[in-house]
Amino acid sequence: MIGKCLFPVAGYGTRFLPATKSMPKEMLPVVNKPLVQYGVEEAIEAGMTNCALVTGRGKRAIADHFDISYELEHQISGSSKEQYLEGIRDVIDRGVFTMVRQREMLGLGHAILTGEPLIGAQPFGVVLSDDLCLNRDGPGVLAQMAALYEEFQCSIVAVQEVPMSEIDKYGVIAGTPERAGLTRVTEMVEKPPQDEAPSNLAVIGRYILTPDIFDVIRNTPPGRNGEVQLTDALQTQAREGRVLAYQFEGLRFDCGSVPGFVEATQHVYEHYYGKDD
Ligand code: G1P
Protein backbone atom coordinates (compact mmCIF):
# COMPACT_ATOMS: atom_id res chain seq x y z
CA MET A 1 0.00 0.00 0.00
CA ILE A 2 1.21 3.49 -0.80
CA GLY A 3 0.69 5.59 2.30
CA LYS A 4 2.25 8.93 1.40
CA CYS A 5 1.48 11.66 -1.06
CA LEU A 6 3.54 14.73 -1.85
CA PHE A 7 1.96 18.08 -2.67
CA PRO A 8 4.25 20.68 -4.24
CA VAL A 9 2.47 23.88 -3.18
CA ALA A 10 5.20 26.49 -3.27
CA GLY A 11 4.38 28.06 -6.67
CA TYR A 12 3.41 31.70 -7.08
CA GLY A 13 0.12 31.58 -8.98
CA THR A 14 0.95 34.62 -11.08
CA ARG A 15 -1.88 33.88 -13.51
CA PHE A 16 -4.38 34.59 -10.75
CA LEU A 17 -2.97 37.90 -9.56
CA PRO A 18 -4.14 39.96 -7.79
CA ALA A 19 -6.13 37.17 -6.03
CA THR A 20 -2.92 35.33 -5.21
CA LYS A 21 -0.94 38.33 -3.98
CA SER A 22 -1.26 37.47 -0.31
CA MET A 23 -3.15 34.18 -0.59
CA PRO A 24 -1.74 30.86 -1.82
CA LYS A 25 -3.19 29.86 -5.20
CA GLU A 26 -3.91 26.41 -3.74
CA MET A 27 -6.42 28.07 -1.41
CA LEU A 28 -8.53 29.45 -4.27
CA PRO A 29 -11.95 27.90 -3.79
CA VAL A 30 -13.70 25.89 -6.46
CA VAL A 31 -17.20 26.75 -5.23
CA ASN A 32 -16.64 26.43 -1.46
CA LYS A 33 -13.60 24.17 -1.17
CA PRO A 34 -9.97 25.16 -1.71
CA LEU A 35 -8.21 23.47 -4.61
CA VAL A 36 -5.66 21.78 -2.37
CA GLN A 37 -8.42 20.12 -0.33
CA TYR A 38 -9.75 18.38 -3.44
CA GLY A 39 -6.26 16.94 -3.97
CA VAL A 40 -5.88 15.90 -0.34
CA GLU A 41 -9.29 14.19 -0.37
CA GLU A 42 -8.29 12.32 -3.53
CA ALA A 43 -5.06 11.16 -1.85
CA ILE A 44 -6.83 10.06 1.33
CA GLU A 45 -9.38 8.16 -0.73
CA ALA A 46 -6.44 6.34 -2.35
CA GLY A 47 -5.13 5.35 1.09
CA MET A 48 -2.39 7.99 1.08
CA THR A 49 -3.28 9.50 4.42
CA ASN A 50 0.18 10.91 5.04
CA CYS A 51 0.23 14.19 3.14
CA ALA A 52 3.62 15.85 2.68
CA LEU A 53 3.29 19.50 1.73
CA VAL A 54 6.25 21.20 0.06
CA THR A 55 5.40 24.79 0.85
CA GLY A 56 7.13 28.13 0.63
CA ARG A 57 6.94 31.65 1.94
CA GLY A 58 3.43 33.10 2.08
CA LYS A 59 1.80 29.67 2.25
CA ARG A 60 0.89 29.46 5.91
CA ALA A 61 -2.82 29.47 5.13
CA ILE A 62 -2.43 25.94 3.73
CA ALA A 63 -0.93 24.61 6.98
CA ASP A 64 -3.67 26.37 8.95
CA HIS A 65 -6.35 24.89 6.72
CA PHE A 66 -5.34 21.36 7.72
CA ASP A 67 -5.33 22.17 11.43
CA ILE A 68 -8.12 22.89 13.87
CA SER A 69 -9.30 26.49 14.00
CA TYR A 70 -9.87 26.65 17.71
CA GLU A 71 -11.72 29.95 17.66
CA LEU A 72 -14.03 28.88 14.86
CA GLU A 73 -14.77 25.52 16.51
CA HIS A 74 -15.51 27.27 19.77
CA GLN A 75 -17.78 29.87 18.18
CA ILE A 76 -19.97 27.57 16.13
CA SER A 77 -19.97 24.42 18.22
CA GLY A 78 -23.54 23.33 18.91
CA SER A 79 -24.98 25.77 16.35
CA SER A 80 -26.61 24.99 13.01
CA LYS A 81 -23.45 26.21 11.28
CA GLU A 82 -21.39 23.34 12.64
CA GLN A 83 -22.31 21.18 9.65
CA TYR A 84 -20.20 23.41 7.39
CA LEU A 85 -17.05 22.27 9.16
CA GLU A 86 -17.79 18.55 8.89
CA GLY A 87 -16.01 17.92 5.58
CA ILE A 88 -12.73 19.49 6.56
CA ARG A 89 -12.88 18.01 10.08
CA ASP A 90 -13.09 14.57 8.52
CA VAL A 91 -10.06 15.30 6.30
CA ILE A 92 -8.05 16.53 9.29
CA ASP A 93 -9.01 13.47 11.35
CA ARG A 94 -8.04 11.01 8.65
CA GLY A 95 -4.87 12.68 7.41
CA VAL A 96 -1.44 13.37 8.84
CA PHE A 97 0.13 16.54 7.49
CA THR A 98 3.83 17.23 7.32
CA MET A 99 5.55 20.22 5.80
CA VAL A 100 8.87 21.35 4.48
CA ARG A 101 9.70 24.65 2.85
CA GLN A 102 11.19 24.97 -0.60
CA ARG A 103 13.41 28.01 -0.29
CA GLU A 104 13.90 28.63 -4.00
CA MET A 105 11.67 27.81 -6.96
CA LEU A 106 14.02 25.69 -9.05
CA GLY A 107 11.45 23.48 -10.77
CA LEU A 108 9.08 20.60 -10.07
CA GLY A 109 11.97 18.12 -9.84
CA HIS A 110 13.58 20.30 -7.18
CA ALA A 111 10.28 20.55 -5.29
CA ILE A 112 9.99 16.75 -5.23
CA LEU A 113 13.57 16.42 -4.00
CA THR A 114 12.83 18.97 -1.26
CA GLY A 115 10.10 16.60 -0.04
CA GLU A 116 12.47 13.63 0.27
CA PRO A 117 12.90 13.91 4.08
CA LEU A 118 9.11 13.67 4.46
CA ILE A 119 8.79 10.66 2.15
CA GLY A 120 11.82 8.45 2.77
CA ALA A 121 12.50 5.25 0.86
CA GLN A 122 9.01 4.26 -0.19
CA PRO A 123 6.83 4.71 -3.26
CA PHE A 124 4.59 7.76 -3.05
CA GLY A 125 1.93 9.71 -4.88
CA VAL A 126 2.26 13.27 -6.17
CA VAL A 127 -0.63 15.67 -6.66
CA LEU A 128 -0.31 18.99 -8.45
CA SER A 129 -3.39 20.65 -7.05
CA ASP A 130 -3.73 22.97 -10.07
CA ASP A 131 -5.08 19.93 -11.85
CA LEU A 132 -8.47 19.14 -10.37
CA CYS A 133 -9.47 15.53 -11.08
CA LEU A 134 -12.97 14.25 -10.50
CA ASN A 135 -14.50 10.86 -11.10
CA ARG A 136 -18.04 10.75 -9.81
CA ASP A 137 -18.86 7.18 -10.79
CA GLY A 138 -15.78 5.38 -9.54
CA PRO A 139 -12.47 5.62 -7.73
CA GLY A 140 -10.45 8.84 -7.98
CA VAL A 141 -7.49 9.11 -10.31
CA LEU A 142 -4.87 8.49 -7.59
CA ALA A 143 -6.76 5.43 -6.35
CA GLN A 144 -6.80 4.09 -9.92
CA MET A 145 -3.05 4.66 -10.15
CA ALA A 146 -2.36 3.11 -6.73
CA ALA A 147 -4.14 -0.06 -7.91
CA LEU A 148 -1.95 -0.10 -11.02
CA TYR A 149 1.14 0.30 -8.87
CA GLU A 150 0.23 -2.85 -6.95
CA GLU A 151 0.32 -4.68 -10.25
CA PHE A 152 3.39 -3.13 -11.91
CA GLN A 153 5.57 -1.72 -9.06
CA CYS A 154 7.00 1.12 -11.14
CA SER A 155 6.55 4.86 -11.58
CA ILE A 156 3.27 5.81 -13.24
CA VAL A 157 2.18 9.13 -14.77
CA ALA A 158 -1.38 10.13 -15.56
CA VAL A 159 -1.87 11.28 -19.16
CA GLN A 160 -4.65 12.56 -21.34
CA GLU A 161 -4.98 13.56 -24.97
CA VAL A 162 -4.85 17.31 -25.49
CA PRO A 163 -5.15 19.42 -28.65
CA MET A 164 -1.76 19.85 -30.35
CA SER A 165 -2.15 23.63 -30.02
CA GLU A 166 -1.89 23.15 -26.22
CA ILE A 167 0.84 20.52 -26.13
CA ASP A 168 3.67 22.93 -25.32
CA LYS A 169 2.20 23.50 -21.85
CA TYR A 170 2.83 19.91 -20.76
CA GLY A 171 5.21 17.04 -20.27
CA VAL A 172 4.56 14.79 -23.27
CA ILE A 173 5.09 11.04 -23.61
CA ALA A 174 5.48 8.48 -26.35
CA GLY A 175 5.66 4.74 -25.93
CA THR A 176 4.42 1.29 -26.72
CA PRO A 177 0.98 -0.03 -25.76
CA GLU A 178 0.97 -2.20 -22.65
CA ARG A 179 -2.77 -2.73 -22.67
CA ALA A 180 -5.87 -0.58 -23.19
CA GLY A 181 -5.28 2.84 -21.62
CA LEU A 182 -1.74 1.94 -20.54
CA THR A 183 1.46 2.83 -22.39
CA ARG A 184 5.02 1.88 -21.57
CA VAL A 185 6.95 5.13 -21.86
CA THR A 186 9.90 5.25 -24.23
CA GLU A 187 10.18 8.99 -24.53
CA MET A 188 9.25 11.89 -22.31
CA VAL A 189 9.82 15.56 -23.00
CA GLU A 190 8.95 18.68 -21.04
CA LYS A 191 6.91 21.35 -22.84
CA PRO A 192 8.05 20.60 -26.41
CA PRO A 193 7.20 22.98 -29.25
CA GLN A 194 4.26 21.60 -31.21
CA ASP A 195 6.41 20.34 -34.09
CA GLU A 196 8.70 18.44 -31.72
CA ALA A 197 6.03 16.79 -29.57
CA PRO A 198 6.24 13.00 -29.78
CA SER A 199 2.45 12.60 -29.37
CA ASN A 200 -0.65 14.36 -28.08
CA LEU A 201 -0.52 12.52 -24.75
CA ALA A 202 0.10 15.10 -22.04
CA VAL A 203 1.14 14.38 -18.48
CA ILE A 204 -1.28 15.82 -15.95
CA GLY A 205 -0.55 16.42 -12.29
CA ARG A 206 -0.88 12.93 -10.83
CA TYR A 207 2.10 10.64 -10.39
CA ILE A 208 3.15 7.54 -8.51
CA LEU A 209 6.92 7.60 -8.07
CA THR A 210 9.33 4.96 -6.87
CA PRO A 211 11.84 6.31 -4.32
CA ASP A 212 14.87 5.88 -6.60
CA ILE A 213 13.50 9.01 -8.30
CA PHE A 214 15.28 11.09 -5.64
CA ASP A 215 18.74 9.93 -6.73
CA VAL A 216 17.77 10.32 -10.36
CA ILE A 217 16.64 13.91 -9.75
CA ARG A 218 19.88 14.66 -7.91
CA ASN A 219 21.70 13.66 -11.08
CA THR A 220 19.37 15.50 -13.46
CA PRO A 221 20.70 18.81 -14.79
CA PRO A 222 18.34 21.76 -15.24
CA GLY A 223 16.23 21.39 -18.39
CA ARG A 224 13.37 23.39 -19.92
CA ASN A 225 13.29 26.98 -18.58
CA GLY A 226 16.49 26.29 -16.63
CA GLU A 227 14.48 24.27 -14.07
CA VAL A 228 15.10 20.78 -12.70
CA GLN A 229 12.32 18.90 -14.43
CA LEU A 230 10.58 15.82 -13.03
CA THR A 231 9.85 14.90 -16.64
CA ASP A 232 13.59 14.55 -17.37
CA ALA A 233 14.10 12.35 -14.31
CA LEU A 234 11.18 10.16 -15.38
CA GLN A 235 12.71 9.88 -18.84
CA THR A 236 15.82 8.42 -17.16
CA GLN A 237 13.67 5.99 -15.15
CA ALA A 238 11.89 4.98 -18.34
CA ARG A 239 15.18 4.35 -20.13
CA GLU A 240 16.77 2.40 -17.30
CA GLY A 241 13.70 0.60 -16.03
CA ARG A 242 9.99 1.04 -16.59
CA VAL A 243 7.56 3.96 -16.45
CA LEU A 244 3.90 3.62 -17.36
CA ALA A 245 1.55 6.29 -18.67
CA TYR A 246 -2.08 5.81 -17.69
CA GLN A 247 -5.11 7.30 -19.41
CA PHE A 248 -7.33 7.66 -16.37
CA GLU A 249 -11.08 7.43 -15.93
CA GLY A 250 -12.63 10.76 -15.03
CA LEU A 251 -12.41 14.47 -15.72
CA ARG A 252 -9.50 16.82 -15.28
CA PHE A 253 -9.72 20.60 -15.09
CA ASP A 254 -6.71 22.85 -15.58
CA CYS A 255 -7.27 25.13 -12.60
CA GLY A 256 -3.91 26.78 -13.20
CA SER A 257 -5.64 28.75 -15.97
CA VAL A 258 -8.60 31.07 -15.57
CA PRO A 259 -10.82 29.34 -18.19
CA GLY A 260 -10.11 25.89 -16.67
CA PHE A 261 -10.83 27.24 -13.22
CA VAL A 262 -14.16 28.70 -14.30
CA GLU A 263 -15.07 25.46 -16.06
CA ALA A 264 -14.27 23.49 -12.89
CA THR A 265 -16.36 25.87 -10.81
CA GLN A 266 -19.35 25.44 -13.10
CA HIS A 267 -18.97 21.68 -13.12
CA VAL A 268 -18.64 21.34 -9.35
CA TYR A 269 -21.56 23.70 -8.75
CA GLU A 270 -23.75 21.74 -11.12
CA HIS A 271 -22.79 18.20 -10.12
CA TYR A 272 -21.53 18.27 -6.53
CA TYR A 273 -22.57 21.36 -4.61
CA GLY A 274 -25.34 20.70 -2.10
CA LYS A 275 -25.48 17.02 -2.99
CA ASP A 276 -24.46 14.34 -0.54
CA ASP A 277 -22.33 11.79 -2.34
C1 G1P B 1 3.98 20.54 -14.64
C2 G1P B 1 4.91 19.50 -15.26
C3 G1P B 1 4.40 19.07 -16.63
C4 G1P B 1 2.96 18.59 -16.51
C5 G1P B 1 2.09 19.66 -15.85
C6 G1P B 1 0.70 19.12 -15.58
O1 G1P B 1 4.09 21.71 -15.39
O2 G1P B 1 6.22 20.04 -15.33
O3 G1P B 1 5.22 18.03 -17.14
O4 G1P B 1 2.48 18.27 -17.79
O5 G1P B 1 2.64 20.09 -14.60
O6 G1P B 1 -0.15 20.10 -15.08
P1 G1P B 1 3.52 23.14 -14.87
O7 G1P B 1 2.09 23.18 -15.26
O8 G1P B 1 3.71 23.16 -13.39
O9 G1P B 1 4.33 24.16 -15.58
Image (cartoon, grey):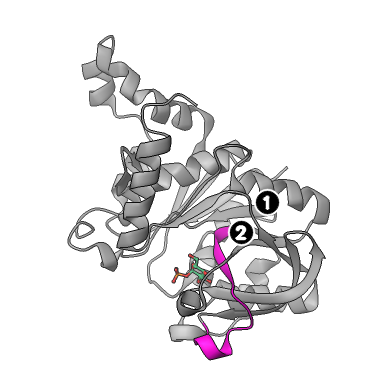
Q: Which mark is residue 90?
A: none
Q: Quadrant of the N terminus?
A: top right
Q: Position of residue 210 (x, y in %)?
A: 70, 60
Q: Is residue 233 visible?
A: yes
The image quadrant that residue 69 belongs to is: top left
Range shown magenta: 192-206
Residue 210 versus residue 192 in the image, above or below: above
Q: Does the Cβ of the disc 1 residue fall within 8 Å of ligand 1?
A: no
- Number of other residues with Cα within 10 Å of mark 1, as a class: few under 14, some 14 to 19, many 20 or more: many
Magenta stretch contains residue 215? no
Q: CA distance from mark 2 to mark 1?
A: 8 Å
- Name the residue at the bottom extreme: 195
The x and y percentages for residue 200 are: 59, 75
User: In the rendered structure, which amino acid carries the disc numbered 1?
Assistant: Met
Q: Is residue 117 above or below residue 136?
A: below
Horizontal placement of 60 versus 154: left or right? left
Which element carries disc 1, helix, strand or loop? helix
Q: Position of residue 199 (x, y in %)?
A: 63, 79
Task: Determine the residue located farthest toward the top in the rendered image.
Answer: 78
How crowded is the residue under tag 2: few (<14 C-alpha within 10 Å), some, or many (20+)? many
Badge 2 marks a residue whose secondary structure is: strand
Q: How many marks?
A: 2
Residue beneath disc 1: 145
Q: Nearer the viewer, residue 213 or 175?
A: 175
Contact flag, marks 2 and 1 (Cβ < 8 Å) = yes
Badge 2 is on which residue?
Answer: 207
Quarter occupied by residue 136: top right
* Residue 244 horizontal side relative to residue 193, left or right: right
The numbered mark, 2 or 1, whose residue comes first in the sequence reads 1
Q: Amino acid at mark 2?
A: Tyr
Q: State the residue at coordinates (37%, 38%).
A: 270
Is residue 203 part of the magenta span, yes or no?
A: yes
